[in-house]
Image (cartoon, rainbow, N blue to C red):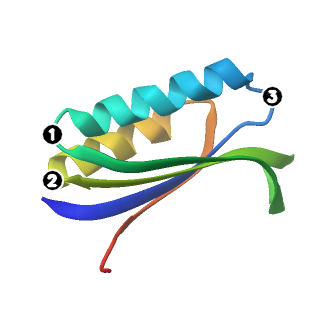
Amino acid sequence: MRKYEVMYIIRPEVEQENVQALVDKFNGIISNGGEVTKTDVIGKRRLAYEINKLRDGYFVLVHFNATTEVVNELDRIMKITDEVIRTLIVRDVA
């Protein structure tokens, strides 16, 4: 298992309890073959530039250990989730 981190942005009109439900959903996907080491819900922030006519979003940063299959599945599910507007998964080398 390798160390990864994922940063994703959730649409600003999503309510706070639904944001937490999405975080739990994605952490559950990671836990099916890996382990979540740290989850940081940064909160609602202004975007550096407009994405799909949106100016704000809820930022979430997750550090985790997982296999390549888990990372691919997480990426696939994040891409088809309508509430997520941007994702970035990187391998943590530190």
The numbered mark, 3 or 1, whose residue comes first in the sequence reads 3
The numbered mark, 1 or 2, whose residue comes first in the sequence reads 1
Q: Amino acid at mark 3?
A: Glu
Q: Which residue is mark 1?
A: 33
Task: Give the CA separation, mark 1 to mark 2.
Answer: 7 Å
Task: Give the CA separation, mark 3 to mark 2.
Answer: 33 Å
Q: Nearer the viewer, mark 3 or mark 1?
A: 1
Query: Viewed as shown, does residue 52 lie left or right of 32?
Result: right
Q: Which residue is mark 2?
A: 67
Residues packed near mark 3 inside 10 Å, few (<14), some (14 to 19) or many (20 plus): few
Residue pictured at 16% horizontal, 47% vertical: 69
Residue pictured at 44% horizontal, 56% vertical: 6
Q: Is residue 8 above or below residue 30?
A: below
Which quarter of the figure is the N terminus placed in? bottom left
Q: Which residue is mark 3?
A: 13
Circles 1 and 2, Cβ within 8 Å, touching? The answer is yes
Q: Amino acid at mark 1?
A: Gly
Residue 52 makes an appearance in the image? no
Q: Amino acid at mark 2?
A: Thr
